[in-house]
Image (cartoon, rainbow, N blue to C red):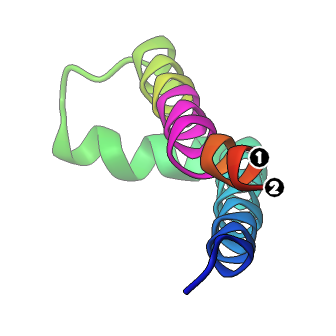
Amino acid sequence: MDKAQFAEIFTKATILNFSILAFWFIAFIRHRDWGYRLHSRWFRDLSKSSFDRIHYRGMMQYEMIIIFCFLTPALVLR
């Protein structure tokens, strides 16, 4: 495989992962109460603010992984 093929793979992976992140964000915004009710059954001490914090932190970490592991190599190879 040459650099162009690797760049294309990283670009497609970046687009796929940002799509997953956007889906997560939209699902979290639209179904936040349902998700909180579901998870608060499993974790009794879970408050709404900690539930929000966990999701936003997860989204932020996922975005950083996408940027560092997929977007940066795609840009470097181009």
Residue type pointed to by label 1 = Leu
Q: Main secondary structure of the magenta part?
A: helix
Badge 2 marks a residue whose secondary structure is: loop
**Tag shown at residue 78:** 2
Which residue: 64% across, 54% down? 24
- Against 46, is 69 above or below? below
Badge 1 marks a residue whose secondary structure is: helix
Residue under circle 1?
Answer: 75
Residue 76: % across, % down: 70, 44
Q: Is residue 62 left or right of residue 46?
A: right
- Against 63, is 50 above or below? above
- Quarter of the N terminus within the rendering: bottom right
Verify CB contact (< 8 Å) between mark 2 and mark 1: yes
Q: Is residue 33 left or right of residue 37?
A: right
**Tag shown at residue 8:** none
- Quarter of the C terminus within the rendering: bottom right
Q: Is residue 47 left or right of residue 30?
A: left
Residue 53: % across, % down: 49, 17
Which residue: 65% across, 40% down? 72
- Which portion, as a residue range, is magenta? 59-70
The one nearer the camera, 58 or 35, is 58
Q: Distance from label 2 to label 1 (Cα)?
A: 5 Å
Residue 34: % across, % down: 56, 52
The one nearer the camera, 32 or 12, is 12
Residue 43: % across, % down: 18, 35
